[in-house]
Each structure stands twice: as C-alpha cells, then as structure tokens.
Amino acid sequence: MSLFAKIQKVEKISPRLRNLYLHRIARDIGASLVGMYGPIFFYILSGSLQFVLTFYGLICLLYFVFIPLWAKLIRCLSMHILMMIGNLLLILYFIFLYFLARSGDIVLSLIILLILSNTLFRLFYWAPYHIDFARFVNKHHRGRQLSFLAIIVSLLGIVLPIVSAFIISRFGFPVLFIFAIVLIFISSLPIFFIPHTREKYSFSYFETFRKLFSKKHFKTNLAYFADGVQDYVGALIWPIFIFTLLKGEYMSVGLVSAAIVLVTCVLRYVTGEAVDRFDKKKLMKLSSLLYSLGWFFKAIVASGFHIFLVGVYHNFASVLFRTPLDVLTYEIAADEGHYVDEFTILREMSLNLGRVLMVVFSLVLLIFVNMAWIFIVAAIVSLLVNLVSKEEFYLVASSK
C-alpha cells in the first residue's frame, strides 16, 4: 500500500475527494511557484504599487459582475469539465505572463489578455471546485480533511519559495512561468477521474444581487466581504512590502517565507482535530482577535527578523482562524442541498466585492499615507469575519 493510500485510509478520504486533492496539490505546486512573486513581478515591471492594485482589482471587478451570468453554465456542464476549462485558462494566463516577461515592459495588449484570461479562469474554476469539495468532504471529519490538504500545501510551501527565488535569480521570470505552465498542465490529469456532478443555478442575474444585499443574509455576506478584504492585503500588499524591506533580494524573500511556513506547518493538523471537537464559533472569536493583532504587528516591522517573527505569529493565528472558518463555510454549503451552487456564487461575489473595495480604499490611502496603514485597516476589517452564521444563511428556507 502506498503512503498516500495509507493516509487516505486514516483520514477517511473517499476516492472522489482523493482525485480532487491530487489535482489541487499538483495545481498548487505550479501556481505557488509564482505565488507571492506574481505581484512582485508586476511591481518590478511597472514600478508602481498602484498598477499592481489596479490590475488585480479589475480582475476581481469583472469576476464580481459576470459570475451570476456565468453561473447559468452550471446546468449545461459537469463541475469537472468546468474545472478543466478553468485549468486550461490558467495555463493561458501563464503563457501571457511569459510573453510579458520576455518583453520586459508593460504591453497594453498583453495586460488586457492577462486580465481576461485570469477572470475567465476564476469564473470556470473556483465555484465548481468549492461545490465539488462541499459534496465530497466527509461531514464528520471536515476539519481534519481540510487540514490534511493544508498541511500538504504548507509542506510544499517550505521548499517552493526558495526554488522560485533560485529560478528567478538564475534564469529570470520567463523560466519560472514555463515551469508553472508544465506543472499546471500535469494537474489537469486527475480531473478526468473526478465524478460527474451537476447543479442547476436557480437565481436570475438581478435576483442574485438582491440576495447578496438582502437583510436576511447581510451578516454572513459581510463576513465573506471582510475575508476578501484581508485576503488581498495579504496576497498583494504584504509580498511587495517585504520585497521592498529586504531591498529586492529574491532569495532573502524566499528563505524568510520558507522559514515561516516551516515553523507553522505542524499546527495545521492539531487545529483540524480541534475544529472537529470544539465549537467553531468560539474558536473563531478567539483566533480572530489574535489574527487581527497580526495585521497591526505587520504595520510596524522594520527588518527581516521582524518579518520572520510576525510572519510565524500571524500564520499561527491564521491556522486557528481559517480552519474553523473554512469548515463552517463547507458546512453551510453542504447543508444548502440543492442550493450549494447558489451559496457558493454569493460567497464568491462577497469575497470579490471585498477585494475590489480593498483595492479602491488602498489606492486612496496611498495618496496620503504609506502602505503600512493598509495593514491597520485589514486588522479592523478582519474582525467582521466573525459575523458568519450557519443559522442565518439558509437559502433553502428563504426560497420557500
């Protein structure tokens, strides 16, 4: 019996979830090779944090506007087919990145193609992935099974930042993007073995927006909105912040990032066990306070050692915070039954609306103050994630 097969048996992972895991792990290896260096690449190329924020903000805005229309495709194709199309669009995105890196300049036509391909990738990939995961995960072991995937990704995260830094330093960004393309293509293979699942999206375009802003679901949608805000601060602002603080040394960025992940990795499994045994809401309330403090600490770091200490602390708080949040999210999705796709679409819209408004607010802040103040905003907003409610958000009841 292979090591993965033994782990699969211990963790009670079904064959269909195993194939979804295999795909996600392979895809994450390719995508994580670029990972935090993606925003850094655009920052170096443009010389402007405002450009980076605008680029990713436009992608999120397009995604937010068009996902209710795209959702109608769900009734036509299986989730795994939609994911396959999304994966191919991600490959196309990295191909455009390769040509942009080779050009060494901001080429408007390539920027437009990058925005369109990334938007389409997100439309085709993320909602089907979350719908299938909610269907496949064992309801009695969601915490452990989510932590199992996170542990594997984290283990890879120890090595990948260093590998990426070496490739960039030695060969440049174009070679990094080639490696990402190959690995993401390989990740398409397990998708063929994922069972066919279909959903029927029930809401019209404008009805979707009415549900999004309805009083009945306001608190939970606001929680995911807040999650989108702090998510993009971590994904866009923090990598560029540490890159500038470490004076543009790719290997220093990679080594510090790897050290942070190494110290944090073991905590994920322990947290997964705790989530399955203890009250998720109570765990979230405590951990969200710890997590919020992490953003304040990030606003005052002044050296590589500070980055390491604060990064370890914030990752630890993130493990405690994100695991119960993700488990609760998939519990809500699974309990929605037929409405799992509607819930997933509304969650994706809330997340991306948060990201868009974070970009707008950050652009305004940068006119008057430095980027450290954006972390303070993230600290305050991240506390709103506690508003997520399994009892409040129930589309099955509200549709009757």
Image: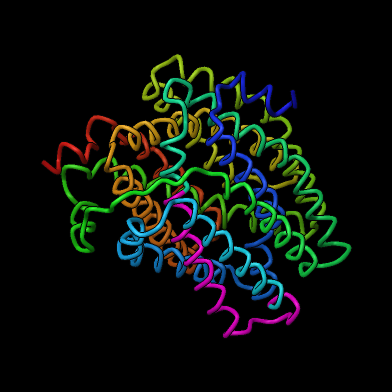
Q: Who's the residue at 76% across and 47% down the image?
A: 160
- On screen, residue 3 versus residue 204, left or right, reads right
Q: Position of residue 91 (x, y in %)?
A: 63, 65
The secondary structure that most of the magenta stretch takes on is: helix
User: Which one is nearer the viewer's eye here, 314 or 140?
Assistant: 140
Residue that lies at the very extreme toward the right in this rendered image: 170
Query: How many numbered circles are shown?
Result: 0
As drawn, 264 above or below 86: above
Q: Is residue 304 magenta?
A: no
Magenta-drawn segment = 100-128
Q: Who's the residue at 57% across and 50% down the image?
A: 192
Q: Position of residue 33 (x, y in %)?
A: 72, 54
Q: Position of residue 242 (x, y in %)?
A: 68, 53
- On screen, residue 101 versus residue 77, left or right, reads right
Q: Position of residue 185 (x, y in %)?
A: 67, 58
Q: Quadrant of the N terminus?
A: top right
User: Which one is nearer the viewer's eye here, 368 or 305?
Assistant: 305
Tell me where residue 396 sits by quadrant.
top left
